[in-house]
Image (spheres, rainbow, N blue to C red):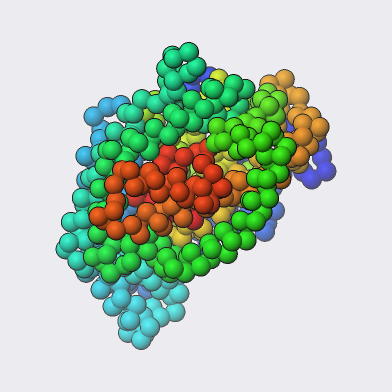
Amino acid sequence: LPEPGKQGTMRFACPLLALPAAAAAFTLPASAVFAARSSPVPSSVATSSSSSTSCAATATTGTAADSEAQTFIDSINTEYERLHRDFEMQFWGTKMALSGPNYSVEELTRTKGEMEAFLADETKLAKARALLEEMSSGAGGDDDNELTAKTLKMLERTFGCYIMESEEAKALRSEATKIEGKLESERNDLVLGANMPGGAFEEMSSVGLRSKLRVDPDEAVRKACWEGLSKIGDFVCDHGFVELVKVRNRQAKALGYQDYYDYKVTQAEGFGKDELFAILDTLEKGSRPIMEKARERFAAEKGGASSLEPWNQSYLMAGDIVTKMDPYFPFEKSVEQWGRSFAKMNISYRGAQMDLDLLDRKRKYSNGFCHWPQPAWEKPDGTFQPAVTHFTSLADPGQVGSGLTGLTTLMHEAGHAAHFANIAMPSPLFSQERAPTSVPYAELQSMFLDALVGDAAWRAKYALSRDGEPIPWELIAEDIAASHPYKVFALRGMIAVPYFEKALYEMPDDELSADSIKALADKIEKEIQGGLSARPLLSVPHLLSDEASCYYH
């Protein structure tokens, strides 16, 4: 990067930045995107992000490296790293629908079970507590080693999240994992699409259906796409979701929780469902009158009550503007936009390797995510273990508007990758995304960084056509004028998910059925969003996955 106040261009180390239209996935060393700077990193930044031998090196010298506590931590780190990697490779292979005998739902279930069984070993929890007690009393000789104590406390908290004293709960956990794996595999095989005007069926993924819903000028086509999205709910409710909800709830109640939502939020955040929704209720109540006024204004400006139909709202808000902006967000430029933008903020990946799968395709999981088969951490000798990151986006370069949405997802997942690539603590368990890692902690940096894509100043600098022409300022202003009064719609669409899951897991077992769940989803959409949603709640993939369910808050 040029020095402040000087002109210059960024040098990239490899030609992968212009993706061929047919490219689906590729492996990218972070150095390819974040090239060496032409001026040194400021010393204040280098001290915090460039050194690989900082805090942990002092914590593992002398007697600490030979202590019983360090030996215990080392054994946990070594075995967890292996089990974590085995599971994450299956997670990636099954979610991305990779071919070959190495990936299967059965192997995903087995590796997840082995990883969780390791973390649920009560003897490990007892050992961590005993070592903490020794350190606090000075008996172990390491009472000054704050980082070792912090690591033991983290292990204590982690083991406590996975230990299940109830044999019934353990059996139910295993059963839920099997139901979930089968359901997600069948969901990946579901042929989605829309019955177009004239009767022809056009196959599209959920991503394609949502894209066309936003930009197609024909209302009949948009309605067909919305109906296609709605079929996801019919399918999952008929293929195991009802039973999955029941089993998850029985597991949570066997462990003494109110329900599955209460179990999930307590494990991740350290407080229960009631406290969470006391917080969310202030947001729901505070934004409700804003939403109601926005719906009234929208109907008045856009042609009456029909404008609020779920297949009309997104298009009438900004569908034609999305089409106008499309030339300035060609998806083949997205990796370069990400690289330039993050590098200008001095965001580095500390030698991480990234496996990127950026394009939508059949059977691929229909939501972006970022996971780490190799977590970043500081080893006992002070050397830094860089992360290996898997992340995905869902662009369709042939679909109008897909470049913008794909770039937003890319920036979000790249934000996760940057966050966890820079965790330098003495165990890989500090840099994994499951409980007890807090959900808002995990999402904060990624949400901030994907918000850049909607920022006017960011767009003026980075939104360029294939010919290098910047997006016209008048078009940026037009988009703001059209969408800003209705930002509350997106907020209400997001909070509808936790309110739906809360109500879902509070339903008595004898009331749970495919019909009752679908009726509940419609009811929550109307109560929270004011009407049926352009993205039907039961099409949200987070609901099915253990990792992402009861997470959207």
> Can residue 114 be spotted in the picture?
no
Horizontal and vertical percent for residue 474? 81, 32
Q: Is residue 163 above or below residue 92?
A: below
Q: Which residue is at the far front? A: 305
**Of 28 and 433, which appears nearest the observer?**
433
* Rendered position, 282 above or below 416: below
The percent position of residue 397, horizontal first and vertical second, equals 55, 23
Q: Is residue 250 visible?
A: yes
- Going 56% across and 55% down the picture, which residue do you hit? 444
- The residue closer to the viewer here, 45 or 382, is 45
Q: Nearer the viewer, residue 72 or 168?
A: 168
User: In the rendered view, does 219 fall on the left or right side of 269?
Assistant: right
Q: Would you say 195 lies left or right of 472 here?
A: left
Question: Which residue is at 33% across, 35% downward?
Answer: 235
Residue at image position (61%, 56%) is 288
Q: Position of residue 504 (x, y in %)?
A: 37, 54
